[in-house]
Amino acid sequence: MLSRSQVFTFILAFSRRLSGLLCVLFGVSLITFTMTYFAPGDKASAIAHARYPDAQGFPPEILEGIREEFSLNEPFFVQFFQWLSRFTQGDFGKSFASNTPVWDIFVANAAETFSLTATALVIGLVFAFGLSSIAVWRPGSLFDRISVALASIGAAMPNYWLGLLLILLFAAHLNWLPAYGTGSPSHLVLPALTLAFWITASQTRLLRAFFLEAKAAPYIETLRLRGVSEAEIFRRHILRHAAVPALTMIGLDIASLLEGTVVVELTFARGGIGSLLAGSVLSRDYPMILFLVLFSAVVYVFINSMIEILQEIMDPRISIWSPQEAVLPGEDR
Amino acid sequence: MTVQADAGFLEEADAQKSNPEIDLKRFLVRLGFSVVILLVVLAVGFLLSPYAPNEPNFLDRLSPPTTNHWLGTDQLGRDVATRLLYGGVWSIGLAFLITSVGAIVGTAVGLAAGHFGRAADVTLMRVTDSFFAFPELIAAVTIAGLLGPSTTNMVLALILVGWMKFARLVRSLSVDLAHRDFVVQARLNGLPSRRILWRHILPNIGPSLVVLWTNAWSRSILSISGLSFLGFGVQPPNAEWGAMLLDGKAYMQTAPHLMIFPGLAILLTVLSINLTGDRLRDLIGSNELSAD
Amino acid sequence: MLCIEKLQLRLHGKSILEDVSFVLPRGHTLCIVGESGSGKSSLLRAVNGLLPATFGSLSFHPKNGRPVSLKGRWKGVAGLSGSRWVMQDPISALNPKLPLGVSVGESVFAQKLSPLELKSAVSAALADVELSPEMAKRRPAQVSMGQAQRACLARALIARPDLIFFDEPLSALDAIVQKQIAATMKRIQTRFDTTFVIVTHDLGFAAAYADHMLVLRGGRVEANQSAETFFKTPESDYCRELIAAAHELGSLSETVAQVSGTKAATPC
């Protein structure tokens, strides 16, 4: 059904997107590497300290040996491309601090972070969905106002403070739940609630706006005049209408959830990728830092591209495949 | 009869047209007044407070709110209310600085991308996208941590991770504007591109930029306090709201006021800036021009 | 005198205009008509150098301005010197942030007038289009569509152009204002001996206005005749259909009457 030129356009657009993506990934790795390369402090002695934690000072031969071993004397771009080629082959290096492969440490910590984010996301979305769909039932009602106020407060709430308040209430005063650390599922409750509150707030606000917009669409009015019940309209039309924008925002939020986890993990002294990053930064464990920062950026880029493609599939009106210039004739830039 | 009705209709249309503008002016006047009043209250606070923010008083440690110390004292006997005042200057002022620098850099990049041809556009936007790919706080923690935890390094880190949203907005708005009839007219009439930029493009980007700037400002306050709370920002003994929270965390059970008041200050400040921004956005009606 | 020969325009491999030629003597009016997508607006944009790949030859000899002569492929020269363009939607053609006076004055930016000279030039131009001088301080949101279109007209006039392009100058306005603006246009043309190129889809307006007709269809010239012969003995079946349709809708005879009525009412 597709003509040859259409297929050609498709391939062209796809390769353009792909090349854009690769460019960004390259840029991301360059920035990450630059960040660690130009960080103040002698890397050789950082490695030496990590290797021999008890030693006081190091003779220059040892430092020189380490520089040789890690190619620290090479020029910037040589080091960068060496690192990049190793990285793309799946060799992420060994942590300076523990001398174990970075990947193993990451995997050991990923489960903590994953369980936290997943729990928070589920709780947050369930609440957001419930709140917003009840709120749009009668816009302007007391419940609606409360949910809007809650959303505004949630957006302004520092989540580290919320975490502390929860600890104060549930751990210190009521003694229901453990405050700090990892371990049993009960350790998960407070951090997950902290993150979930923020998700609920931002998503309620957005979902409410999308629902209201969908509700005001002309064809919904037609359905109403035809006597279709409100519940039916909501279930069959408004939900579908609001799905695309909502999906986008949820996707973006998963990306910024990464940020939230750093703060929450540190606030609750939990293990996980966030506290691993903070620890690595403070101990200047460069392979670990490189991997974690790059990992979060790649996840971010990946999620963004997935959202765009999903949007394309669910809403044919947004065509990411068509070259942009075609829309704008009359420009001679 | 018809003529009268027509005239009435026209007047009504006119009134509707000019309404948002009047509303905006009224709002800006009210905003200005509130800021002035706030500044006066703060100044009076600074003048009247008998305490220095960083001066310890070991005789009066961890005191709950009293008539002498309205918000109590911390673990070193410093007056929490005074420290909150000074901390506000750090949090709000630094956020203001960071956001403004980010806005200027981002606007310059966005305009350059929009106006210096295709090659510049692609290159600059790829760079912007690359920077954008880092979750803000993660990048900030890493940069601030690697450079060494200090106020200057935190400011640097937050500027580095904060300019991209301005670049994106300005770029997309200016590309959009370049195709608008009035800009095409200006080009046809032989106006130099610098004048087109200053008189036609920038003033029409302005409102959306202000809305984004307000939003970025409040987020920046959260980031500053967050970084300081995590130990990567303003260092003790300086009073900053996040740093005060970090101090208070250790005395949560015995002196909860140490963590409640700084958090409340952050929440209320961010909330009021956000609400102001929302109102501004509604009044400016930047939706028609908004980029995302 | 504007002379265009074998103009050809391609965008993204698609042919938009093919082999368009016409000659327009000074002080005359050319109406370009055609259905949407026939290439009317693209023709204006191409002539004004707003579209990239344009081939053909163009020559334009303004009374006071350097003559323009382009051959082969031309691009990137925005605006013919000695010409101005009035767009369809006056509100979007004016910068919402600038007072009308500034927008009008910018049209002669290149002349580097002193502020005082500029001010009097702007007031004179506003007076030419029957706007009061106070209008110079208003912003586009504070004036009616008709007033905005007059300001656009003033912006063109202030440069004393030999040639003014109009892209559907009346279609954004309601009937009474259309009539008034049309009358103003007529008056200006007689007074300054300006050449008009008007893109329109309104045959009635064209009938009352044009000296020459250019009918475009699918990017090709369907008819290129003097207006008189066009309406009496159209060149092709398509043109006959067009005229018949306009008659049926009643727009033709009515507008002819309207504009000839105004012609009589406003002596030049």
Image: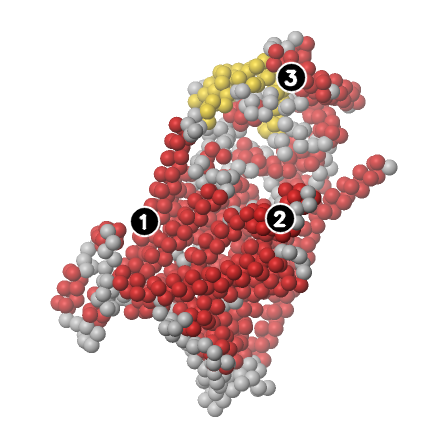
Residue marked by disc 2: A233
Is disc 2 in the same subunit as disc 3? no
Residue C199 position within the rendered picture, expressed as x and y whole percent measured from the top left: 61, 24
Nearer the viewer's eye, disc 2 or disc 3? 2
**On the rendered image, what quadrant is the C terminus of chain C found in?**
top right
Q: Find disc 3 in the rendering and name its residue.
A: C242
Q: Residue A216: give x, y in percent of width and height.
A: 64, 47
Residue at 44% in and 57% down = A254
Task: Kindly identify the residue that appears in the image at 49 percent across and 16 percent down.
Answer: C19
In the image, B132 versus B55, the foreground residue is: B132
- Under mark 2, the amino acid is Ile
Q: On the rendered image, what quadrant is the N terminus of chain C found in?
A: top right
- Report if the CB atoms under discs 2 and 3 are less than 8 Å apart: no
Specify the amino acid type for callout 3.
Leu
Q: From what the image shows, is residue B25 above or below residue C178? A: below
Label 1 sits on residue: A26
- Residue under the image location 50 percent in, 71 percent down: A162
Which residue lies most toward the right here? B1
Quick one: label 3, few (<14), some, or many (20+) residues within 10 Å?
Answer: some
- Asked if C249 appears above or below A15 in the picture, the reply is above
Q: Along the polypeptide, which appears first: circle 1 or circle 2?
A: 1
Q: For this rendering, which residue is in front, B53 or B71?
A: B71
Q: CA distance from mark 3 to mark 1?
A: 59 Å
Q: Position of residue B111 (x, y in %)?
A: 47, 45
Question: In x, y percent, where is residue B15?
Answer: 74, 47
Q: Amino acid at mark 1?
A: Phe
The colour mode here is: secondary structure
Q: Secondary structure at mark 3?
A: helix
How many marks on residues? 3
